[in-house]
Image (tube, coloured by chain):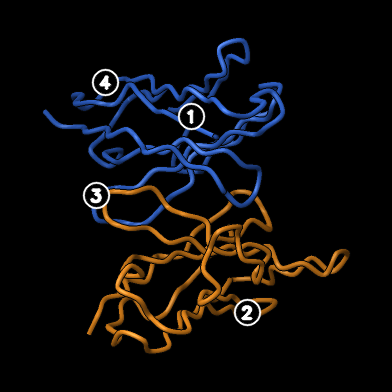
Chain colours: A blue, B orange
């Protein structure tokens, strides 16, 4: 069974940083692109970033503006999202997802709240 | 970036009634070399992650009830629920994966009348 379990969310002050993790299991991690999608409270889905199986190709949404870094540790079956210079607009549930195009597998998400 | 626009934003439907949600893409999602439309539909219930219902515009994901169907091509697509059930109350999103970055519609909330 495919499982994606996010962690690392929490309350952070504006300007702060967080590193989100997503532990994957139930599939051959090293053969799949991984993505992050976020959802602000009461709002729609917004794609954030993706990384290829080797970890050497990454793509980001325009709104990231150089503040986010995506990486993966294939030995640990884990993908990361480093988020810097957080603002209130980054408050959202961050979902880890498996897929290159359509997304058949999603984690349950981790909530990031940016507030002073 | 491709803008995806859904209509309506919300609708209330009686149990057993047919429900139709529309999705319009800012450009064609039809890749002519393989004749596939790069369009997916998702269902999201409160407190849950999205669930993939339809991909390639009309292919039902494994395990999805056959009352859900997708149609359309190019820029105009439709998700139809042939007879609404209570468990279908959710927000529905379309997504294009024709070009990066992928993008989602704003969502359509379906409620029971």
Residue most extreme to the right: B33
Q: Residues within 10 Å of mark 4 (few under 14, many from 20)?
A: some
Q: Which mark is residue A41?
A: 3
Which residue corresponds to the image point at 54% horizontal and 37% vertical from the top-left? A35
Q: Which mark is residue A16?
A: 4
Q: Residues within 10 Å of mark 3 (few under 14, many from 20)?
A: few
- Dividing the image into 4 quarters, which one contains the N terminus of chain B? bottom right
- Dividing the image into 4 quarters, which one contains the C terminus of chain B? bottom left
Q: Share a chain, discs 1 and 2?
A: no
Q: Quadrant of residue B6?
A: bottom left
Label 4: state its secondary structure: loop
Disc 2/disc 4 C-alpha distance (Å): 45 Å
Which residue corresponds to the image point at 64% horizontal and 76% vertical from the top-left? B75
Of residues B86 and A72, the one drawn nearer to the viewer in this rendering: B86
Instruction: Give the residue pinned by disc 2.
Output: B71
The location of residue A91, given as percent across then percent down, is 26, 39
Q: Share a chain, discs 1 and 4?
A: yes
The location of residue B59, given as percent across then percent down, is 66, 67
* Relative height, residue A100 to residue A68 (above, below): below
Q: Quadrant of residue B55?
A: bottom right
Q: Which mark is residue A66?
A: 1
The location of residue B26, given as percent across then percent down, is 59, 71
Q: Residues within 10 Å of mark 1 (few under 14, many from 20)?
A: few
Residue most extreme to the top: A75
Label 1: state its secondary structure: loop
> Comparing marks 3 and 2, which lies closer to the viewer?
2
Q: Quadrant of residue B2?
A: bottom right
């Amino acid at each position: 069974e495919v499982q994606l379990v996010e962690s690392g969310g929490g309350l952070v002050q504006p300007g702060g940083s967080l590193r989100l993790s997503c532990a994957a299991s139930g599939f051959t991690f090293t053969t799949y692109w991984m993505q992050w999608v976020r959802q602000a409270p009461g709002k729609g889905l917004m794609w954030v970033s993706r990384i290829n199986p080797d970890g050497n190709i990454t793509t980001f949404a325009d709104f990231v503006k150089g503040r986010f870094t995506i990486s993966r540790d294939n030995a640990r079956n884990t993908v990361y999202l480093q988020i810097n210079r957080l603002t209130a607009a980054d408050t959202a549930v961050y979902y880890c997802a498996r897929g290159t195009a359509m997304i058949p597998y999603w984690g349950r998400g981790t909530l990031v709240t940016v507030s002073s | 970036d491709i803008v995806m626009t859904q209509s309506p934003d919300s609708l209330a439907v009686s149990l057993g009634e047919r429900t139709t949600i529309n999705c319009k893409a800012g450009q064609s999602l039809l890749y002519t070399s393989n004749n596939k439309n790069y369009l997916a539909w998702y269902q999201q219930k409160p407190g849950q992650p999205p669930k993939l219902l339809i991909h390639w515009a009309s292919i039902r994901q494994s395990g999805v009830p056959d009352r859900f169907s997708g149609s359309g091509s190019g820029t105009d697509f439709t998700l139809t629920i042939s007879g609404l059930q209570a468990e279908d109350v959710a927000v529905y999103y379309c997504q294009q994966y024709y070009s990066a970055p992928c993008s989602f519609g704003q969502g359509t909330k379906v409620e029971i009348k």
